[in-house]
Structures are given as C-alpha cells and as structure tokens.
Image (cartoon, grey):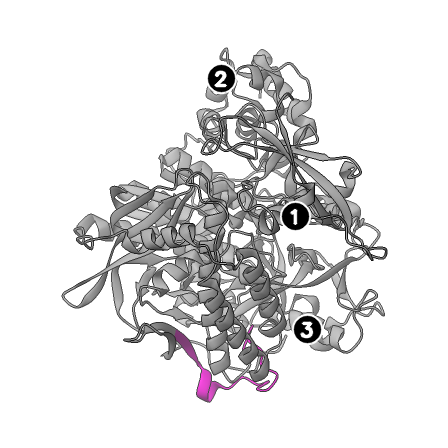
Amino acid sequence: MKIHKYDTVIVGAGGAGMRAAIEATKRSRTAVLTKLYPTRSHTGAAQGGMAAALANVEEDNWEWHTFDTVKGGDYLVDQDAAEILAKEAIDSVLDLEKMGLPFNRTPDGTIDQRRFGGHSRNHGEAPVRRSCYAADRTGHMILQTLYQNCVKEGVEFFNEFYVLDQLIVEVDGVKHSAGVVAYELATGEIHVFQAKAVIYASGGTGKFFKVTSNAHTLTGDGQAAVYRRGLPLEDMEFFQFHPTGIWRMGILLTEGARGEGGILRNKDGERFMEKYAPVMKDLASRDVVSRSIYTEIREGRGCGPEGDHVYLDLTHLPPEQLDAKLPDITEFARTYLGIEPYTDPIPIQPTAHYAMGGIPTNVEGEVLSDNTTVVPGLYAAGEVACVSVHGANRLGTNSLLDINVFGRRAGIAAAEYSAKAGYVELPENPAEQVVNQVERLRASTGTERVAEIRRELQECMDANVMVFRTEQTIKTAVEKIAELRERYKNVSVQDKGKRFNTDLLEAIELGNLLDLAEVMAVSALARKESRGGHYREDYPNRDDVNFMRHTMAYREVGEDGTESIRLDYKPVVQTRYQPMERKY
Amino acid sequence: MATPTLDKADAAGAPEPGFADSPYITATFRIRRFNPEVSADAVWEDFQIQIDPKERVLDALHKIKWDEDGTLTFRRSCAHGICGSDAMRINGKNRLACKTLIKDLNPAKPITVEAIKGLTVLKDLVVDMDPFFQAYRDVMPFLITKDTNEPTRERLQSAEDRERFDDTTKCILCAACTSSCPVFWNDGQYFGPAAIVNAHRFIFDSRDEAGEQRLEILNDKDGVWRCRTTFNCTDACPRGIEVTKAIQEVKRALITRRI
C-alpha cells in the first residue's frame, strides 16, 4: 500500500473533472485519479452542443434559458442553481473558445448556434437557437480542449487508477472527507490519497440498463463510494431516456439531428410528434418525446416486423447539410446499420442516457450529508452530482454546460478550501475496506458469474423501470435486484492476477451498479406521481402537493448487519417561477 | 509466427443444431495472448463462438471474456468509435474493435486479433500508451496566443479559416495511425503521425500564434522528415482523417515557412 498526500484530489477526468482540474491546479497541489485515460471519458460522446444565451443569431437571454431549464425539469429544479447555470453559461462558452475550442462559426465569424429540444424564445413561444456546437462532435471538442489545457497547465494525472472508497472521518461530530482509496489497474496495488479536498467527477450510472447510450465504464463508481459511507443520494429515480438511440444498440443520435430539421415518423410515415407537442413538435423535451415514441409503438404504429421502433427521417435535408452538421451520426448509421441517411430513414428507439440524480451538492459543489449540512472537504460536479439544475428531466445541451459551470465552481471552491484547511487525520487502517473487497473477490470460489448477473440486472431494468413504470413493475425490479444482490455475494472472477485485472474490475463495477439500481427502484416506488423522466402509469399526473420535493436516499446498516434504504425528502428551491402545467 | 497455438474449440462447443433461421454464425477468433504473470512468451489462442456477423469485433471479445475466459484483457469504453480505447490489429490491420463488423472480415477464416505494434505489450491487447501521449505533449497541443488583453467576447474566425484545420480536430488519440507506421516500429523516438496531426490542428488554426515554434519542434531529427509517405496511417485512421496529407502540409509549411 502506498500513501500519497495532495491538497486536492479529483476523481474522474471527463469534462467536469478536467474543468475542475484546470482551476484547482492553478491554486493547489492537485492530483487527478481516473479509471480511464482522460480522453476516453464519455464527455467525448456528447454530440449536439452546449447551451448559452449568446444571442449570436437571434434574440435570447439567460432568463429565458433559466425558465426553459426549470420547465424542462418539470419544476423539480432548484431555481437558484438554474439561474447560475444560465447566467454563467455565456462565460463558460466564451472561456472554452478562448481555450481553443473550434466551434462552428456564423458568417460574421462568431460562434454559431442551433435549435435544441426544450429551448425556446420568450417562455415557450417558439424554438430558439441557443446551442453552441462543433458539428455533431461538441463533446469530443470539449474533452479534447480541456485535456489540451490540462497539458498546458501541467495537471498531474494518475491514469487507470480506480477509486473504490471514500474516507470519511468525524471531527467534533461533523463528517469530514479525509481522502480516497484507489486501485491501480496496471499493478493491482492499493493507494491511499490523503487530501484536504476531494472532488467527485466520475460520471453516470447508465450501465444498469441494457439499451443505453452510456459507455461500458459508466458504472456509478463515485455515487457508490460515498453512498456506502452513509452519505445520501438525491433524486435517483429520475433517469433520462434519450429519444433517438440506434435501434437495439442504443448508440446516441443527437437531438441536433432534429434541431437541423430531422423528423420522427411512425410506420405510416406520420409525423406523430405534432399530436403530442403542437408547438415544439420533434423538439419537445426528451421525456415527452420518448413517451410519445413508446405510445406509438404500443398502439401498433411502430416500424419493422416487430413494430418495435420508429424512424428518424433526415432524407429531406440536403446531403451537404448532413455532411457539414451531422457527419458523425450519419456515419454511425452507415457503419452499424448499413443505412444511407441521405435516402433512408434511421430506425431508432429511446436509450437510457443520463442520471439526473446523484450526490447532493450546493451551488459551490460542496457535498451534503443531509438536507443542509456540508461535508467539509468533499465536492462533486457533473453527472455524478445533483445540484439540482436538471430536476426531473435534463434539457439537451445543458449537461455539457453543467460540467463546465459546476466543474469550474467545484475546482475553485475545493482549491480555496484546501488552501486554508488542514489535513484530516486518516483512519487507522484506511485501506482496510478496499483490501478486503478486492481480496474477497480474488479469492472467491463462488459459482456466480459477473456477466450473467449484469445481464439479468440490465434486462430487469429495461423491462421494469424504463420509460413507463407502475407499482407492479417497480416491485418486480426491487425483488429481482434483491435476488441479484444476494447472488452477487457468491460471485467469483477467473482472473486471479494483479496485472490489468479487468475481470476483477468488472466485478467491482457490478457491485456498484447493483447498489445504485436498488436505490433507483426504491426511490421510484415511493414517488407516486409522474414528473419528467419518472412516469408512473398508475399515477399519470404530477402531484405538487405531495411530491414537489427531492428524494434523499440513505443506506442504513442495522445492528445485525442487514442493509436497508431510508428515504427522506428535501424541499425544492423556488424563486421566480410558479409550477405550471408543462406543454410543448 | 513460431509460437504455440492453443486450441479451445472444444471448450467453446460446436454449433448447436437448429440454427437454420438464426443470424448466428460460428467464427474463430485467433487472439495473441500475453501475460507476464503467467509466462514470458506470447501465444496465439483460438476461440470459437456463435455470433451475429453484424456485431462488432468488440462484441466478440466481450462474448469471449464474459462467457469463456475472464482473463482476456483489452481496453474499451464507449463502444462506438469515439473514445479511442480499443485500437487493435485485426486481421493484420489497425482498427477499432468497436467500429469493425465481423461480416466485413471474412469470418469463414479465423479472425486474428493482436495488440497494436510499436508500443510495449503489457497484457494481451493492452499496450503501454505513455510514450504515445508523451509525443503528443511534446508538440504543445494547446492554443497559444500572445494577446496581452484577453478579448471579452469570442475571437472571430471565418468559416473558411475554421475549415482549414477541421480534419485534424477529429483525432481521438487512439494510436491506430502511429502504431501502423513502419518508421515508428523501427524507431520509437519518431513523433509519429498522431502527434503531427495534433500539431497540424494548431499550426493551421488562424487563432494560434505558436505555429513557428511547433514547426521547429517537428523540424527535429525525430520529426516530420522521418515520414516515408507509406499512407499506412491514413488507411488506419478510424476517423477518416487524411493523416498523410496533414503531414505533407506540415512539411510544406516547413519548406515555404508559410502557414
């Protein structure tokens, strides 16, 4: 075991982690621990753009953006945070341009902007051009630009270091962060990083679904590490299903395709979104479009022999426009489906895309141990966190924005904290839990296989807690997850070695997914209403009287060692906007 | 290759009957295995699996790892050609496993899969990427401007100026190009195509003011003149970047001293 000492440790090197690292490195001795090489992070898969009311191509302002974000989140958004997001969006985009990001340009040479779902002029009048973009590779450009600037600033990376545990120590009755414990993939060695401040920026949890746009590596590692140490997770029942994943594969096809004029059609060729969202049509918010697609499929208007998908039609758009604005997604259709998007519509279905919930933070990125108490020295930003700027449903282009605004804020806040704070003493055996976990898995002779349990988990989640949910389906999921968690105790790995043991890594990741799937299902069961991405067929309406509140889920361990989940609730911060019925 | 071959066909099982209407075929993957914890020698190992030929090579590797041999080790993440983790040598050509469909590989014959060349193999298909990223860092891959006052708004750039370096912004640093280059195989000191591509991305960006410095770096004995224009890099690039053309443009800029 090796012990390292840094002022600030950042867990994860996607957009939020690297944006934080650029700030933290300037202000404190910083280490970035990342499971992947930084440029492999899933920020790079984001396509369509980053929202900011630059008003480069038409009238726009941050207040309209705030409203759209609050409405898009079905009023579960904390409005003070949404206002910060929309206001700081403008400088965030300009900062990236100054760092070198190659945005598409207008004829005047300014940053070009295009339409995106849920973004409107003057509180819902009509779609507005707010998304700043670089073809359909905006996430790729952001990830590359941030990595380039990390190289420039001399950010210190520990590549392929997998953080498995968060060290929490009580000082005068208050939980403090003392550091993290990491597993070095190349050698199997365990490292303790003592740090004054720790920032989690480790991304989402999408891999508990089968059809997902998420990378194989998105297994909720950060959420699981803090949850196991008794910290809450907020709003985990809210998961976004992106309307346009490639049929069966789930690979993302950007909403920018509809921003450029693409149309969703059912088997009769009908533009069905006109029925569900007369004003915004194909550019309604994602939860609305995903439900509309499944309604078409359920009512027998799906495409293909099994009627299990619909079409994204780009054939009326000029090939030059597709080549210039949507080169990557048209190539995906050619590569994976053998379809030419110039002439043929693309089969799509909703795909599990984004966790709105996560580790609760305030607007400085400080992690909360209950509704109000800050954990000194602990921060989170990006998809792993829940500020909450996305509420019950995130708007497209607001996640690339979130990682930049709140990555930056967390980086500054953490480094400023570590400049004035001292180290918290490490617990006596800081690596004990991780050593036990790793050794138990390596030594296990159990008969259960990781891949089999993961497959069953993913199938269960797709079948029971995806776009449509009922009490019955969620209960089925809760029971199945409990069974899988029990079987997981008997899991073994074939690779017993130390060097690049990805077999072991996948086993640990599965443990995280199982814990988080349970939190999601239990949180969803208790929310007896429909709001944003959480749709209950048995409670089809939003219920502001009983459920205008954030879910806070805590892991409880009884005296006999039995684990359970305790749910609590936190008020939503409302400033300017009263909840209204959501229409697009 | 004079290395022993293990045959695992029996373990994988013969094709089941009743597959007449199934899209599945039986394919053999011949994978170059190396694990220094077990043996100092690399060996080829065969795996026979049932798979839909429309699936990716990455799907086949997962099938093997998840259902047959958990020790098989490779990097992967996004699984659709954007993260650059899974560059490998498939049937003798550098490709991304997640962008290569089995049907495009003549699955009637064994499909060979091995680590990319020119970088030290650490285990199975995993190589040491550090020298690759060091070459990248050496070309100063970030925008450098000499403004004394930062502009308050964005810098202006015409669509034409933006287009000038568009091709090289697509790079995902997968190393497929660099590890397909015979010059790099023979001498790891050569910067290699990927680093030059990333230098090109800034040299030809109208906002950047350090083009001369980067050209001097690439004028070095291990720089751009080592390129023998074999086009392996262009063929290998999973993003369709015209790598050789980018290298030629850097060479031309060095000769004419005009960007």
The residue pinned by badge 1 equals B59
For the image, the number of numbered tags is 3
Dot 1: chain letter: B
Query: Which quadrant of the rendered structure holds the N terminus of chain A?
Result: top left
- Residue B172 appears anywhere in the view: yes
Image position of A424 with respect to A235: above or below: above
Q: Does the magenta stretch include residue A211?
A: no
Q: How busy is the neighbourhood of tag 2: few (under 14 within 10 Å), some, or many (20 plus)?
A: some
C-alpha distance separating marks 3 and 1: 42 Å
Image position of A551 with respect to B215: above or below: below
Dot 2: chain letter: B
What residue is at 43 percent from the left and 38 percent from the top? A499
Which label lies toward us, 2 or 3?
2
Q: Does the magenta stretch include residue A535?
A: yes
Q: Quadrant of residue A25?
A: top left
Instruction: Name the disc covering residue B189, or none.
Output: 2
The residue pinned by badge 3 equals A279
Principal SS element in the magenta part?
Answer: loop
What residue is at 70 percent from the left and 76 percent from the top? A276
Q: Are marks 2 and 3 on the same chain?
A: no
What residue is at 51 percent from the left and 65 percent from the top? A65
Query: What range is drawn magenta here?
Result: A531-552
